Image (tube, helix red, strand yellow):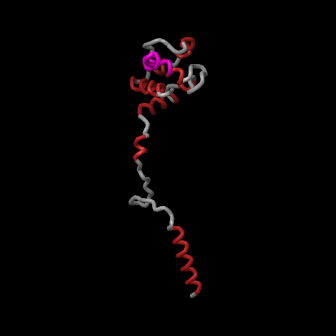
Amino acid sequence: MKLILKSFVFFIIVFSITSCGEKKETDAYGNPVEEKTETSTKTSVDPLLAKGQELFEGKGTCIACHKTDVKVIGPSIKEIAKIYKEKNASIASFINEETGPIVDPIQYETMKTNFAITKAMTAEERKALEMYMMSFE
């Protein structure tokens, strides 16, 4: 009888300790449901900006020559954005070969090899790429 009583007391103590945590809401299947907050919707990234970053780092191969703060092969993204803003120019037009280089004309011949990639992009993709680059200051 003492063994049953001790086991029962032990079970109650363990149950009490484990149930004292924070209560989590669960769905119909017992899976935890995350709370939605207002701030998460306010800090969402513009899909066009995200697409621009994806193109810059992937299909566009821009990241091979352009880094955020430093000149590697081509000028830094910050330098490009600064000059294009000052001149009220369009990166999208440049990568479509509609306008000439305004940042580092010496590197123009090197950049020309990528125009096949950028010209194959849709107008929306070129705009997304421009939007991403112009987001740097």
| Residue 34 place in picture, x, y as percent | 44, 53
Q: Nearer the viewer, residue 105 or 134?
A: 134
Look at 42% across and 59% down and name the residue there: 25
The image quadrant of residue 5 is: bottom right
Q: Nearer the viewer, residue 44 or 99?
A: 44
Q: Is residue 46 left or right of residue 71?
A: left
Question: What is the tally of numbered marks visible in this picture?
Answer: 0
**Residue 87 in magenta stretch:** yes
The image quadrant of residue 50 is: top left
Q: Nearer the viewer, residue 130 or 137?
A: 137
Per the rendered image, the range of residues in magenta is: 82-96
Vertical position of residue 28 compared to residue 81: above or below = below
Q: Residue furthest bottom?
A: 1
Look at 48% across and 25% down and name the residue there: 133
Vertical position of residue 20 compared to residue 123: above or below = below
Q: Nearer the viewer, residue 126 or 38?
A: 38
Give the overall secondary structure of the magenta segment. helix
Look at 40% across and 58% down and name the residue there: 27
| Residue 15 place in picture, x, y as percent | 52, 72
**Rendered-image quadrant of the N terminus:** bottom right
**Residue 61 in magenta stretch:** no
